[in-house]
Amino acid sequence: MDWQTDILGDDYQACAFQAAGPDGIERTATLVRRIPDATGEQRPADGRAVLFLHGWSDYFFNVELAEFWAARGFDFFALDMHNHGRSLPHGTHGGYVADLSDYDAEITAAIGIIATLRPAGTAPPQLTLMGHSTGGLIAALWASIHPGDAAQLVLDSPWLEVHGSPALRRAFRTMVEPFARLWPESVIRLPERGFYWRSISSAAEGEWTLDDQYRPPHAFPVRAGWLSAVLAGQSRVARGLNIDVPILVLISGASANGMFWKESMRSTDAVLDVNTIAVRALSLGRTVTLERIDGALHDVFLSAPRVRADAYNRLARWIRAYVLDDGGAP
């Protein structure tokens, strides 16, 4: 693998690779890693790693999240999936995918690369798969058809269901499928809302430095094939995934929606219906822990410092219980 210094700085490296999906098409993805000895710490002897999947119209940039996992003995990796972020070729449709299973090959390949980085003669690492928003939906679907490949699943505001009810999802699928079948790359005209970007970007009213080329303020255009793929994935979740590893779902305590900016969008999920997500999370598997975090944004780990500290404390508690299982103090 050709590892290069990443855009995040000298403590991070990235490598691009290709993986063929079920349709036989080779797609490019980019694996990002935090260099384990960047600050002098030792690699975890027991071989734990975490792989993070970003949301739609997004990429990995949250160094604080990587440092959190590293401080707990995990090798940290993030995957910029094809047509996103570091893996977005010039002139292609940003974020586009016609079937969420097209991501399976690159996730599996990334995990294989992670295994090769372990010292010779050691077992592959115990893997925690983490996903945000659409990445959370993708992570859950992947885990459901790859039993045993991930030891735990952490989902940050996963997009498991549409706003409102399953009846709305079924209605949306009925309307979208003819376009997805005949004109999959056609753009569905929806009102542009940059409220979430406004709440997180330091170029607006947030605290995070974002690359607008990788994470556009108004997101990528919504295309019929992509929306159909998401709705199909959500339908699979609704039928039940029966994932047999421990799952943590973190969501905001409340949602804020609407066509105009509201101050409440600084402390709520301005993208998803958290109450619907909370109910749908029960369809994921046998052991599901739900954490509702008051004041959290759509990505709970991009919330205000006090709020995300709460989120990290809850995640640390879950790690001690379901990963480390040592019953020790924080």
Image (cartoon, helix red, strand yellow):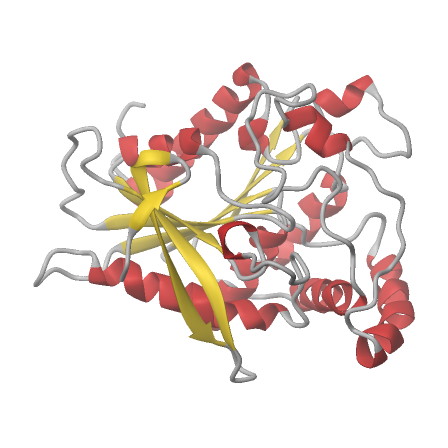
Q: Is residue 67 left or right of residue 123?
A: right
Residue at x 88% of width, y 61% of height? 167
Q: Quadrant of residue 210?
A: top right
Rendering coords of residue 267 (x, y %):
70, 22
Report whether residue 96 is seen. Answer: yes
Q: Quadrant of residue 107?
A: bottom left
Residue furthest to the bottom in view is: 24
Report whether residue 147 is seen. Answer: no
Residue furthest to the front in view is: 90
Q: Is residue 330 left or right of residue 277?
A: left
Q: Is residue 295 left or right of residue 318?
A: right
Residue at x 35% of width, y 34% of height? 9
Q: Is residue 63 above or below residue 88?
A: above
Residue at x 77% of width, y 54% of height? 221
Rendering coords of residue 101 (x, y %):
57, 72
Q: Is residue 180 above or below residue 326?
A: below
Q: Which quadrant does the C terminus fall into?
A: top left
Name the residue nearer the viewer: 9 or 64: 9
Rendering coords of residue 270 (x, y %):
76, 34
Residue at x 64% of width, y 21% of height? 206
